[in-house]
Image (cartoon, helix red, strand yellow):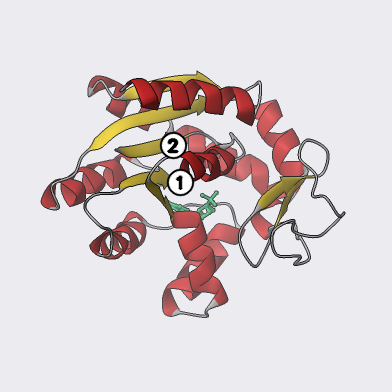
Amino acid sequence: MDIILLGPPAAGKGTLAQWLIRDFDVIHASTGDMLRKAIKDGTELGKIAKPLMDAGKLVPDNIVNGIIQEWLRGIPAGRGIIFDGFPRTVAQAEALDEMLASVGRQIDCVVSIQVTEEIVVERIGGRLSCPRDGSVYHATNYPPKIAGKCDKCGADLIQRDDDKPEKIIERYKQYLEKTMPLAGYYDQKGLLFPVDGRGGSEEVYAMVSRKLRSS
Ligand code: AMP
C-alpha cells in the first residue's frame, strides 16, 4: 500500500509516519530528510537546497523528482511506501504518478491532515529535532525524557533553521499556494482521506490506522 501524507508543516506528518512504519509494512520516503542528509554530506544537491530550505522556500520540482526517482530504484516490490513531504506541488504529483506507474505501483490513499495556521506556528515554535537520527520532539507537547537530549540516541537536540519563527510563516505560505491544490488533485481521483489534526497525533493515528486496516 502506497500512501501520501499531506499537510502543512507541523501537521504531524513525521510522527504519523513513524507510527505507521512501526505498525505496518511500509518504508518512509521523506524528501525533507533526504535533502537534510545531502546538506550534511556536503553534496552539490545539498549546496543548491540549503539556501532555499533555510528561506522556507521549496526546492525545484526537477530536483526533488530526481531524488525520488533514484530512491524508488532500491525499493522492494512487496513493501508499501509512506511519502512524507512529497509531492508538494501538482507537477511533483504528476511526476510521481508516472514514476510509480513505470514500476507497477500506484497511490492507494492520500491522508490530508488539517490544522490551523495558529497551530502550525505554536507547534513549530516549540519543535526540537535530533540532528543525528531525525527524531522530532516538542518542548511542551512531547518533551524528550532528558531535557535537550534525543531519547533514542542521546544527541543534543536543536531547533532546525527553517523552524525559526520568521521562517514558519513563509513555509505555511508556500504550503497554501503550492501544496494545498494537491487536495483537489487527489480528491478527483477518489484517493483523499481528510483528517482533523487539531487534536494531536494519537487521534490522527487512530483514524488513519483504522482506515488503512479496512482498505
Ligand atoms: P520537511 O522536512 O518535509 O518539512 O521539508 C523541509 C524543507 O525541505 C521544505 O521546507 C523545503 O524547502 C524542502 N523540501 C522537502 N520536500 C520538498 C518537496 N517535495 N518539494 C520541494 N521542497 C521540498
The Cα–Cα distance between marks 1 and 2, rounded to whole angstroms, is 7 Å
- Circle 1 is placed at which residue position? 85
Front-most of residues 73 and 152: 152
Front-most of residues 190 and 88: 190
Amino acid carrying mark 1 in the image: Gly
On screen, 134 above or below 93?
below
Label 2 crowding class (10 Å Cα cut-off): few <14, some 14-19, many 20+? many
Q: Are marks 1 and 2 in contact (CB under 8 Å)?
A: yes
Which quadrant holds the N terminus?
top left
- 73 with respect to 130 (left or right): left
Dot placed on the residue nearer the N-terminal end, 1 or 2: 2
Q: Is residue 87 in view from this perspective?
A: no
Indicate if the residue with disc 1 has its beta carbon within 8 Å of ligand 1.
Answer: yes
> Which secondary structure, mark 2?
strand
Residue 147: image location, x then y, percent: 87, 54
Which quadrant holds the C terminus?
top left
Residue 52: image location, x then y, percent: 53, 60
Amino acid carrying mark 2 in the image: Leu
Residue 150: image location, x then y, percent: 74, 59
Quarter location, residue 196: top right
Q: Please tell me which residue is depicted at 35% across the width and 37% down the height of the picture.
A: 3
Label 1 crowding class (10 Å Cα cut-off): few <14, some 14-19, many 20+? many
- Looking at the image, how many numbered discs can be counted on the residues? 2
> Which secondary structure, mark 1?
loop
Residue 110: image location, x then y, percent: 36, 30
Q: Is residue 154 in view from this perspective?
A: yes
Front-most of residues 83 and 55: 83
On screen, 139 above or below 48?
above
- Circle 2 is placed at which residue position? 5
